[in-house]
Image (cartoon, rainbow, N blue to C red):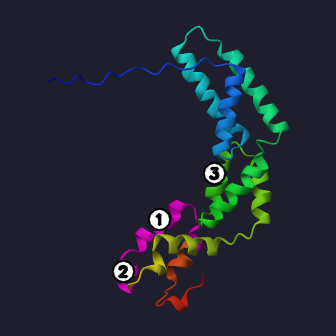
Amino acid sequence: MTFDAPQNKKKVLKKITKQRLKNIGLYYLERFESSVQNLRDVLKRRVDKYAYENKDFDKAQAYQWIEEVLEEFQKLNYVNDERYAELKIKDYLNAGKPARYIKTKLKAKGVNEDDVEDLLSKEDYDPKKMALKFAKKKKIGPYRLDFDEQKEFRQKDMGTLLRAGFDYEIVCDILSQNFGTEEDELI
């Protein structure tokens, strides 16, 4: 008895039409909140993939359909950059992410920097509190149980906090703290 290797059948892509792009966008929005630019990128990737396989396909026409679909979604309030930014900011703040990280991520998703600044100013954002939350989550700095370990890993912990996007002064302040017990914690 011989076994044949499984056939690697190439998946045939469905033809891209305006209605298909609309359906792809709706399906994406069912699962994820999105900014306008992010949804545009998702739809363009689908068009590009189809156009790569079908050389005679008119990408310019498909890009025009994408803009029409996005305009319609905005009118229906399916896609709203401000709502998206509010949700992501809350998520990032709950995770203890610094403002620099939040701004960078939202800028990459096409959200206006001024809008992000305004929304961040409305939130209860304290950089030191966020750095402590981050350190606690990662169990670094003052949240290492052993004081000798805190001293030994100080440079490594400093690098972790700095790469996360926290300012140097805040990082130094956090790492200079020593929580011996749970009762001493600031959070």
Numbered disc 3: secondary structure:
helix
Q: Position of residue 23 (x, y in %)?
A: 68, 30
- Is residue 125 located in the magenta-colored stretch of the structure? no
User: Is residue 5 shown left or right of residue 109?
Assistant: left
Cα distance in 3D space between marks 1 and 2: 15 Å
Q: Position of residue 24 (x, y in %)?
A: 65, 31
Q: Which residues are magenta?
A: 147-170
Please tell me in which quadrant of the rendered image residue 40 appears: top right
Numbered disc 2: secondary structure:
helix
Q: Residue at x 55, y 10 (%)?
A: 55
The disc placed on residue 137 is: none
Are dots 3 and 1 in contact, CB under 8 Å? no
The residue tagged 2 is: 149
| Quadrant of the rendering where the N terminus is positioned | top left
Q: Nearer the viewer, residue 40 or 2?
A: 2
Q: Earlier in the sequence, mark 3 or mark 2?
A: 3
Q: Main secondary structure of the magenta part?
A: helix
Tell me if mark 3 has few (under 14), some (14-19) or many (20+) residues whose alpha carbon lies within 10 angstroms of its own: few
The disc placed on residue 104 is: 3
- Is residue 157 located in the magenta-colored stretch of the structure? yes
Asked whether the viewer can see residue 100, the reply is yes
Please tell me in which quadrant of the rendered image residue 131 appears: bottom right
The disc placed on residue 160 is: 1
Q: Amino acid at mark 2?
A: Glu
Q: Is residue 185 above or below residue 92?
A: below
Q: Position of residue 22 (x, y in %)?
A: 71, 29
